[in-house]
């Protein structure tokens, strides 16, 4: 009973905390969705590019691209394609267009020429891809695209001025210029918190049931001793 009295309130408290976190996260997501509709790209940059925030930008792809090396999908070696994008208003930004399989030999690079024309891209704010997968050193070449192990904000700004301190990951494979863009979520959503809350409440229920069973057995044993 002492064990139950100590841990049952704790488990219930953790479940309630996760419910509160889910509500807070839902409010944040709704706010971000509203801002994505009402604020243009320059205003979003000024307001703060928080990781996970949805964003839509209209502009043109640039010529500079980086191939983020040593990215595998389903056991297949490949690259993530990072390409400069120039919105009609506001600063340029690096767009992660997704994953593409590598050619058979290291001497070859995939054809990642971005589409030409004016496009509206939907995505989410993400961090620059660092720290590196294998090494902090990348051999820089003069030609484009450049194969790199990482791409930090200072390195990218050497090539493209006025870049913000975040990039955009395309929302899905249907976006213009996208490859395989099936990302894991950058932001834990409300449903995840609801799932955690359900786990804590389930543990609390199990603890309560076991305590009742243990108490019943003890009471039954005492009654048997009295009758004996």
Image (cartoon, rainbow, N blue to C red):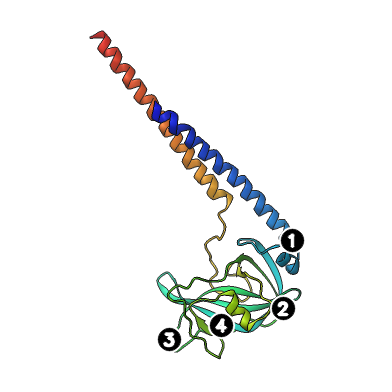
Please name whichever residue, 3 or 62, is drawn nearer the observer in this view of the structure: 3
Q: Residues within 10 Å of mark 3 (few under 14, many from 20)?
A: few
2 and 3 marks in contact (CB < 8 Å): no
Give the mark nearer the N terminus: 1 vs 3.
1
Q: How many angstroms separate mark 2 from mark 1 (CA)?
A: 19 Å
Give the side of residue 221 with respect to residue 89, left or right: left
Q: Quadrant for the C terminus, please.
A: top left
Q: Secondary structure at mark 1?
A: helix
The answer to which image quadrant residue 223 occupies is top left
What residue is shown with label 4?
112
Label 4 neighbour load within 10 Å: few <14, some 14-19, many 20+: some
Secondary structure state at the residue bearing disc 2: loop
Of the residues under marks 2 and 4, which one precedes in the sequence? Answer: 4
**SS label for mark 3:** loop
Q: Which residue is mark 1?
A: 37
Report x, y in % for residue 207: 41, 32
Residue 85 on image: x %, y %: 66, 77
- Residue at 52% x, 37% y: name it: 13
Q: Along the polypeptide, which appears first: circle 4 or circle 3? A: 3
In this rendering, position of residue 148 left or right of residue 216: right
Which of discs 4 and 3 lies nearer the camera? The answer is 3
**Which residue carries the number 3 mark?**
106
Tell me whether the residue at label 2 lies in contact with that at label 4, contact meaning CB atoms closer than 8 angstroms.
Answer: no
The Cα atoms of the two marked residues, 4 and 3, are separated by 16 Å
Q: Please name the residue shown 51% across and 46% down the image.
A: 195
Asked if residue 171 can be seen in this view, the reply is no
Q: Are marks 4 and 3 in contact (CB under 8 Å)?
A: no
Q: Is residue 36 above or below residue 1?
A: below
Q: Which mark is residue 118?
A: 2
């Amino acid at each position: 009973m002492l064990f139950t009295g100590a841990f049952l309130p704790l488990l219930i408290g953790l479940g309630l905390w996760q419910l509160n976190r889910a509500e807070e996260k839902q409010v944040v997501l709704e706010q971000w969705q509203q801002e994505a509709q009402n604020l243009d790209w320059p205003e979003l940059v000024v307001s703060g590019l928080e990781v996970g925030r949805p964003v839509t930008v209209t502009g043109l792809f640039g010529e500079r691209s980086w191939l983020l090396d040593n990215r595998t999908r389903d056991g297949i070696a490949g690259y993530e394609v990072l390409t400069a994008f120039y919105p009609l208003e506001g600063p340029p930004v690096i767009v992660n267009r997704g994953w593409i399989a590598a050619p058979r030999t290291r001497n070859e690079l995939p054809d990642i020429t971005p589409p030409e024309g004016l496009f509206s891209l939907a995505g989410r704010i993400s961090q620059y891809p660092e720290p590196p997968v294998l090494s902090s050193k990348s051999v820089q070449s003069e030609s484009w695209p450049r194969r790199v192990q990482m791409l930090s904000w200072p390195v990218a700004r050497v090539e493209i001025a006025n870049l913000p301190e975040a990039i955009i990951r395309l929302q899905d494979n249907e976006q213009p210029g996208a490859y395989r863009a099936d990302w894991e979520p950058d932001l834990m959503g409300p449903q995840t918190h609801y799932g955690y809350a359900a786990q804590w409440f389930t543990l609390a229920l199990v603890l309560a049931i076991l305590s009742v069973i243990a108490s019943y057995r003890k009471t039954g044993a005492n009654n048997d001793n009295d009758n004996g």
